[in-house]
Amino acid sequence: MAEIINAENQTEKQVEYATFWSRAGAYILDGIIVGAFTLIINAINIANFKSFLIYLLIAIVTIFYKPFMESKYEATFGKMIFKLKVTDQNYNQIDFKQSLIRSIILIFPTIFFVPIYYLAFNNPNLAEYSQIFEFAQGLAVEYPIQSWISNFSFLIIVIDIIVLLTDQTKTQRSLHDRFGKTYVLFDCK
């Protein structure tokens, strides 16, 4: 962020708001990073341990990844690669609570899956599966509500993207930015 001096000789911050494509790229990279981690650990868990506690640990890491990274470093790994950062409405670093509020629409699906996976890891019909994709198919049969949660989550993400794409201001804010009262900016350090 560069500073400029205005006509009244006061310092102002000059900001450049992140574009849709830079944000989309960061989101995809974060999905790959977190997705690869969770897929590998879940596959090992299902093949060897079938432990709900391991799943719960993965869910906790997934839930707190964005809030922790954005409050501590102003960006997730994906945002860092695209040189983006998250700020509050005064262009200052956000705290954990604000980042948690900002991330809530992405966190809710994981929270809703926790009780389903608790039941699944204690379900004898699913105990025989040792491959992650077999387990996922069995999970879909045993607990069809999970598809409703997935579809609802997808709908929320689509609405979030539509809000971002139709933002008529220069700020390029999505729905979750509005909830968290945040901006995503290019990090001009």
Image (cartoon, rainbow, N blue to C red):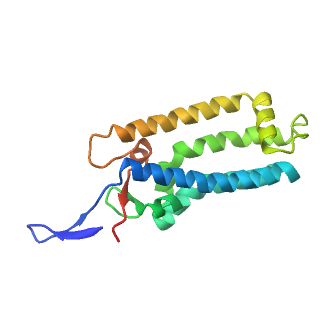
- Please tell me which residue is depicted at 81% across the width and 39% down the height of the picture: 135
- Please tell me which residue is depicted at 32% across the width and 40% down the height of the picture: 167
Asked if one can make out residue 145 in the rendered structure from this viewpoint, the answer is: yes
- Please tell me which residue is depicted at 46% across the width and 55% down the height of the picture: 98
Q: Which of 97 and 86 is in front in this view?
A: 86
Would residue 145 appear left or right of 183 to someone viewing this image?
right
Q: In which quarter of the image is the N terminus?
A: bottom left
Where residue 165 sits, quadrant-wise, is: top left
- The total of numbered circles placed on residues is 0
Q: Residue furthest left?
A: 7
Q: Where is residue 185 in the image (x, y as percent from the top left)?
A: 36, 58
Q: Where is residue 153 in the image (x, y as percent from the top left)?
A: 57, 36
Would residue 144 appear left or right of 107 to someone viewing this image?
right
Q: Is residue 44 above or below residue 176?
A: below
Asked if one can make out residue 119 in the rendered structure from this viewpoint, the answer is: no
- Please tell me which residue is depicted at 89% across the width and 40% down the height of the picture: 127
Q: Where is residue 96 in the image (x, y as percent from the top left)?
A: 51, 59
Where residue 68 sits, quadrant-wise, is: bottom right
Q: Is residue 12 above or below residue 102?
A: below
Q: Quadrant of the C terminus?
A: bottom left
Q: Where is residue 7 in the image (x, y as percent from the top left)?
A: 8, 67
Q: Which of 36 and 16 is in front in this view?
A: 36
Would residue 33 appear left or right of 4 to someone viewing this image?
right
Q: In this view, does 132 lie above or below 5?
A: above
Would residue 156 appear left or right of 178 to someone viewing this image?
right
